[in-house]
Image (cartoon, rainbow, N blue to C red):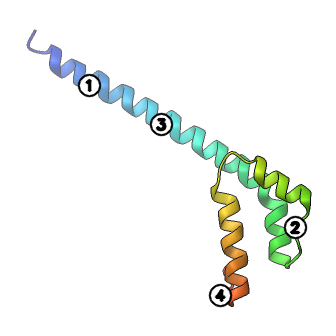
Amino acid sequence: MGCLPGLLHHVEVFIFNEFFRALLHFRNTLIAFQRSIHRPIWSKVGRGERLSLEDGLTMYATPELFSPVRIAHSVQQQISGHEEMA
């Protein structure tokens, strides 16, 4: 009975590590996928072109919020004279 708490701790750590690794893999895969979707939009923003309705719908349909926020921030920086294209 004395080693059971230690064994449970190791099992909990192992489960947490595996869950965290799977979560990071999923996040990285999703980010790579989202960036590929937004690449044409980033190109338009970089050239100073207006975005189309289709571009807006693409960003609206995206489950993650970070890329559209970065695009909006980039445009705001360009307008204010602080050009920082990512």
N-term mark: 4 or 3: 3
What residue sits 31% from the left and 30% below the top?
13
Proximity of marks 4 and 3: CB atoms separated by less than 8 Å: no
Disc number at residue 10?
1
Say which element carries label 1. helix
Q: Residue at x 80, y 75 (%)?
A: 46
Which amino acid type is shown beneath numbered disc 4? Answer: His
Say which of marks 4 and 1 sits in front: 4
Q: Is residue 23 visible?
A: yes
Disc with the residue nearer the chain's start (2 vs 4)? 2
- Report, in whole angstroms, how far the alpha carbon at label 2 lies from the one at label 3: 37 Å
Q: Residue type at mark 3? A: Arg
Query: Is residue 51 toward the left or the right of residue 20 in the image?
Result: right
Of callouts 2 and 3, the N-terminal one: 3
Q: CA distance from mark 4 to mark 1?
A: 50 Å
Question: Which mark identifies residue 51?
Answer: 2
Q: Report, in whole angstroms, how far the alpha carbon at label 2 lies from the one at label 4.
A: 20 Å
The residue wearing badge 4 is: 82
| Distance of label 4 from label 3 (alpha carbons) | 37 Å
